[in-house]
Amino acid sequence: MTALTQLDAGTLVARLTAGEVSAREVVDAHLARIAEIDGVVADGPVWAAAPADELGAEHTHAFLAVTAEAARAHADDIDIRRAAGEPLGPLAGVPLALKDVLTLRGVPTTCGSRILEGWVPPYDATVSQHLRRADVVVLGKTNMDEVAMGSSTENSAYGPSRNPWDLDRVPGGSSGGSATAVAGLLAPLAIGTDTGGSIRQPAALTGLVGAKPTYGTVSRYGLVAFASSLDQAGPFARTVEDAARLQAVIQAHDPRDSTSVPDPVPDLTAHLRDGVQGLRIGVVTELQGEGYEPGVAAAFAAALERFERLGATVVEVSLPHAPYGLPAYYLVAPSEASSNLARFDGVRYGLRVDAPTAEQMNAATRAAGFGPEVKRRIMIGTHALSSGYFDAYYLQASKVRTLIAEDFRAAFRSADVLVSPTSPAVAFGLGTKTADPLAMYLNDVATVPASLAGIPALSLPAGLAPAPDDSDTALPVGLQIMAPLLRDDLMFRVAWAFEQDLGFVPRPTGPRAVEVGR
Amino acid sequence: MALSEAEVRHVARLARLALTDEEVAALAPQLTDILGYAEQVGEVAADEVEPTVHPFALANVVRPDERRASLPRQDVLAAAPAVEQDRFAVPRIVAEEG
């Protein structure tokens, strides 16, 4: 019999509904696997139990806190309500890993930072409320690059997560803990957040489906802000259908988020199986070629052939301003971050380092609470917004955003969806890119254009490629699919057709992969 | 444009970050690199272009001017590093006359 941890969410819902398994059994199976391979030793925050430098190289370290007791109680409650014939939510009894950037009342939220260590939020994020309403069982909070800044999860103040495909490699970031949880079979579903690629890139590096919804369709209330005009929560899953179902659960207009879009969101699953016959798949000239690893380029070329075999037409399109996307992103995002992170001042929550004056207290607290990458980005953003530089930096970058959005609108006149590799590289070794911040930023080159334009984009597996530094290890390659604003349904439809034809099974293999059973 | 260590210290003051000398020395070349890369946006002719801050043309969003319950005071203060008389306590901000 297949272990419960190997089942996708759709299969679990079917078996739970049929009464073949209880929610409690499903949750217990996942908690047991977390205890086995994640390095968690007790209920509650892992950082309180094991300092980062004591985390073993044999553990995945997906979770910062496991809420085992609450998860079991929630599962029992679902089983009781099911037995009583009460109506249940669409994902009732399915376990989920929640990125530690979203609040869950009464559970510590760290954002991967020392600045929030010990903070217990007194309220739920809107996303958390939607999950509860859907009867999703939250297993715990996942590791991430500090304040969601990074592409490897190495910027977490609590130690890096490790890629289930090779424990010596990064799972990508910033939502690396969420990706690790789903790829490592610790949870069938996870929520991440994506500002410039923080869902899509880790999904690519761990062989998962990860989607960034249209900006404004998922509430940011209770999401600790990094770059407010870009941040968006979205799903991780092992199948396209699971990802679409999870996104549908969290997508809704929210009066508590002033950037929330009031427009109705199309049904994400009604046309999921309609196929790609007759659709035009646009290949973006500027998002391929130099800088992409040969294995990534080969998998991408094969993906285009697959689309043609499936009856789609592959056309070449240009986004002339896409090469300016990354430079614009690294002005817009740090600028907004420098403003957003001003709230961490040692006054209302989190860390405080005492000092004689308020300003000294603020500065000492922030110096002690933030890690190097966060300090770097606060400095970039503060400089870019400072007197005399605003027009040349933030304003100019915001104008480039307009031009990129116009490029996309033009491209979508000749193509229904656009595709590119998600990441120029497969999963890289821990510590290999930390010395050069700019080299790390280049991981986002293919994902930031969609972020700047606000359009929906997802990554799904396109197959495996040999690691450039180790030909014995095969690692997942991600295919990015981008769709027009509010056409998340079309994005999932194209992804589903590709997934069904490829038949990729997201099971880590290789000498340093986690054990996943048969 | 290269950022000097003096400029780094100025920006750190604006950002309320108490940086060590080592951090200042490391940041000056790193920020110079990153800003040099980002300055490519200046190559784009965009004088007549409207800036984007949101992909949808949303107008100001306001809610009805009605009283609503806020979070309980004790729940909010429970998270604060220092509390006095039901308020957030901070070091002195205004110097005493003297």
Image: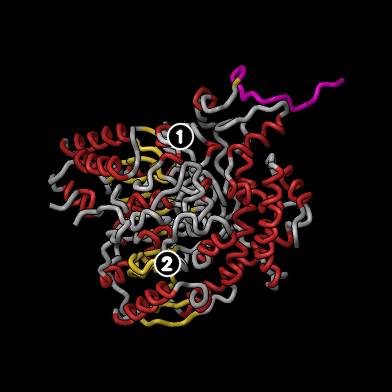
B76 over A486 or under it: above or below: above
Image-quadrant location for residue A319: bottom right
Q: CA distance from mark 1 to mark 2?
A: 46 Å
Query: Looking at the picture, how far across and down is residue A71, in whole percent?
Result: 29, 36
Q: Is residue A90 magenta?
A: no
Residue drawn where x is 41% and y is 57% of the image = A169
Residues tagged 1 and 2 counted as in contact (Cβ below 8 A) = no
Q: Give the residue type that dot 1 points to.
A: Tyr
A84 over B80 or under it: above or below: below
Q: Give the residue type that dot 2 points to.
A: Asp
Left/right placement of residue A502 relative to residue A114 reads left
Residue drawn where x is 18% and y is 52% of the image = A14
Q: How is the image coloured?
A: secondary structure
Disc 2 on helix, strand or loop?
A: loop
Left/right placement of residue B54 relative to residue A108 reads right
A479 over A10 or under it: above or below: below
Which of the chains bears the disc numbered 2? A
Q: Which residue is mark 1?
A: A123
Query: From the image, which quarter does the C terminus of chain A lie in?
Result: bottom left
- Crowd tier of the residue under label 2, counting other residues whose Cα lies within 10 Å: few below 14, some 14–19, many 20 or above: few
Q: Is residue B91 magenta?
A: yes
Residue A469 is marked as 2
Q: Residue furthest toward the top? A: B85
Which of the chains bears the disc numbered 1? A
Residue drawn where x is 74% and y is 42% of the image = B13
Towards the viewer: A325 or A485: A325
Left/right placement of residue B54 relative to residue A281 reads right
Query: Looking at the picture, how far across and down is residue A480, in whole percent?
Result: 42, 68
Residues shaded magenta: B84-98
Towards the viewer: A110 or A410: A110
Viewer-nearest of discs 1 and 2: 2
